[in-house]
Image (cartoon, rainbow, N blue to C red):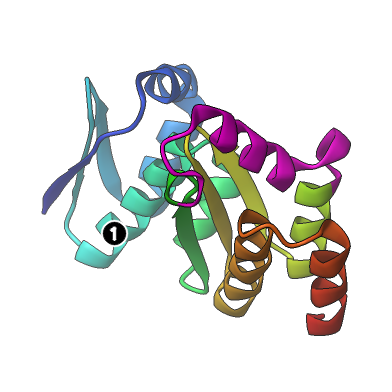
Amino acid sequence: MIDFVKIPEERLKFLKKEKKFLEELQRFSNTKIKLNEEVYLEADDPLKLLRVKEVIKAIGRGFMPTDAMDLLDESYYFLSIDIKSYAGKSRNRLTTLKGRLIGTCGKTKKMIESFTDTKLAIYGKTISIIGRWEDVIMAREAIEMLLLGRMHSTVYKFLEKKR
């Protein structure tokens, strides 16, 4: 079975530099990966192909390869939220929302990651989450609260209760 993934050019360049990671991913998942303008994937098992596709998408959305490898485990999920849908057409609002999600010195992002046991990547116009399903849902709720304008303290209290 053959499939392809289109990822941003700068992330594709990053992936091309990670030859050891690509070799390990191919060996571990029993797939073939070719990098051109898109990432071409080939595998006999459609489930493995889907898992590797998720790993490549996660790298394309800003995750480090070591974090993206978690997606090969069937209990981990990848979710991407479009920040632009909350910002409207304003570029300034998009920047403000990304700032709210990151927080001062990355405090908010780190808090969400630690309380929900997930990994977050804020890249371009999206925020992406990797983790177990229940944890991803809890992180998504906290992120949506921030995107809708709730106070950071309210979100922190929500996370403490949920945990």
Residue 64 seen in this snapshot: no
Residue 150 falls left or right of residue 126: right
Q: Look at the picture and state if 125 lies above or below 159.
A: above
Q: Look at the picture and state if 85 lies above or below 124.
A: below
Q: Amino acid at mark 1?
A: Leu
Indicate yes or no whether the magenta region holds residue 116.
no
Query: 101 or 6: nearer the eye?
Result: 101
Q: Quadrant of residue 144?
A: bottom right
Q: Position of residue 56 (x, y in %)?
A: 39, 42
Q: Position of residue 83 (x, y in %)?
A: 50, 47
Q: Position of residue 140 (x, y in %)?
A: 59, 66
Query: 121 or 47: nearer the eye?
Result: 121
Which residue, given by chain and number where applicable, does mark 1 sit on? Answer: 50
Q: Quadrant of residue 32?
A: top left
Residue 55 falls left or right of residue 162: left
Q: Position of residue 82 (x, y in %)?
A: 44, 49
- State whether the magenta stretch is mostly helix, strand or loop: helix
State the residue lying farthest toward the left: 1
Q: Quadrant of the N terminus?
A: bottom left
- Provide the residue span drawn in magenta: 86-107
Q: Write the residue at 38% across / 23% down.
A: 12
Q: Write the residue at 48% across / 20% down.
A: 14
Q: Residues within 10 Å of mark 1 (few under 14, many from 20)?
A: some
Q: Write the residue at 79% across / 66% down.
A: 155
Q: Secondary structure at mark 1?
A: helix
Q: Quadrant of the C terminus?
A: bottom right
Residue 126 seen in this snapshot: yes
